[in-house]
Image (cartoon, grey):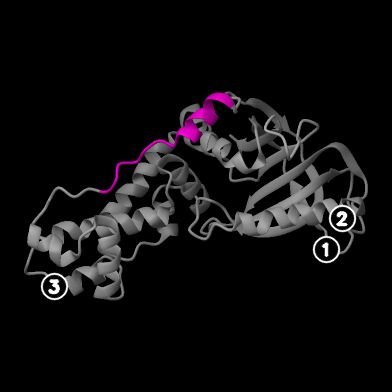
Amino acid sequence: MNYLIEVQRGIDYIESNLDFDISLSQVAKSANLSQWHFQRIFKALTNETLKTYIRSRRLANALDKLLDKNQKIIDIAFSAGYESQESFTRAFKNTYAVTPNQYRSLGNRNLFLKKLEFDQNYLEHIHNNITLEPIIYQQAAMTMVGLKTCFYSVDSEKNNIAEKLPPLWESFSNTESDIRHTIAGNAYGVIHQIQSDSALLDYYAAYEVKHAEKLAKGMALIEIPSSMYARFSHRGLATELDNTVNYIYASWLLSSGKKHTGGPDLEIYGPEFNPDSEESVIGYAIPIQ
């Protein structure tokens, strides 16, 4: 599947609706993707959130309108999605370093948004810290037990990973002995989309178990269906894992011809994982078809 074509459909939808309120879920729907997967791929490609992109494009759309002196600035502000001329002026000046009135007086058609620059750390990461070609394997169905939370990831304006995941893993390390019938080997981070029209995700810190019975208080059960997975190796600190995920979604998935099933992604913490070492290895696997 060519995700670049799908993302372009979403961008085309945005461009056709700059004068109206734009729903993130509708953008994703126009691309035939779920909201989370569209936002994930978009963020990986552009290094900005979908909501920020829409806001900046609607602001840029106001440039041409300002050159028409018959249009009132307050009307332009409303069409760009701002509730008042004052909030529009603040956002405009923060972006272009001049007020709408000053821009109109200058008649300057040569103001452009900053060109996207590659992040050097990201480039170095994909060259040195990722297995660029994954292991493709058929994963049997798994039953897992662990602790659960909900969060918004880095591709969302509401990103709250730092608030949600570290405390969850700390609690998990203190309660993992409460999990019975574990299968030795790996701990897992399970990322699962809750609804196709939302960027809110379920996250489990869990162990695979032979069978689940009489769960300890606070523990959650998750069933992982059998699926083909593509597994990558991330070398480095867990705080840099998002660079690996960006590569998977923005580079490998876009060119592989594969399609994400919409099932859960897996973070795999095995014997090579060391939270304090830059030589630590974490597996990251996505379900594909």
Tag 1: residue type? Answer: Gly
Q: Earlier in the sequence, mark 1 or mark 3?
A: 3
**Pointer 1 local density, CA inside 10 Å: few below 14, some 14–19, many at least 20:** few
SS assignment at label 2: helix
Magenta-highlighted residues: 113-128
Q: Residue at x 87, y 51 (%)?
A: 176
Relative to 135, is 116 on the left or the right?
A: left
Relative to 233, is 48 on the left or the right?
A: left
Does residue 126 belong to the magenta stretch? yes
Tag 2: residue type? Answer: Thr
**Pointer 3 local density, CA inside 10 Å: few below 14, some 14–19, many at least 20:** few
Q: Earlier in the sequence, mark 1 or mark 2?
A: 2
Q: Which residue is mark 3?
A: 72
Tag 3: residue type? Answer: Lys
Residue 208 in picture, x, y percent from top left? 82, 43
**Pointer 2 local density, CA inside 10 Å: few below 14, some 14–19, many at least 20:** some
Residue 222 in picture, x, y percent from top left? 76, 52
Q: Are marks 1 and 2 in contact (CB under 8 Å)?
A: yes
SS assignment at label 3: loop
Q: Which residue is mark 1?
A: 218
Q: Earlier in the sequence, mark 2 or mark 3?
A: 3
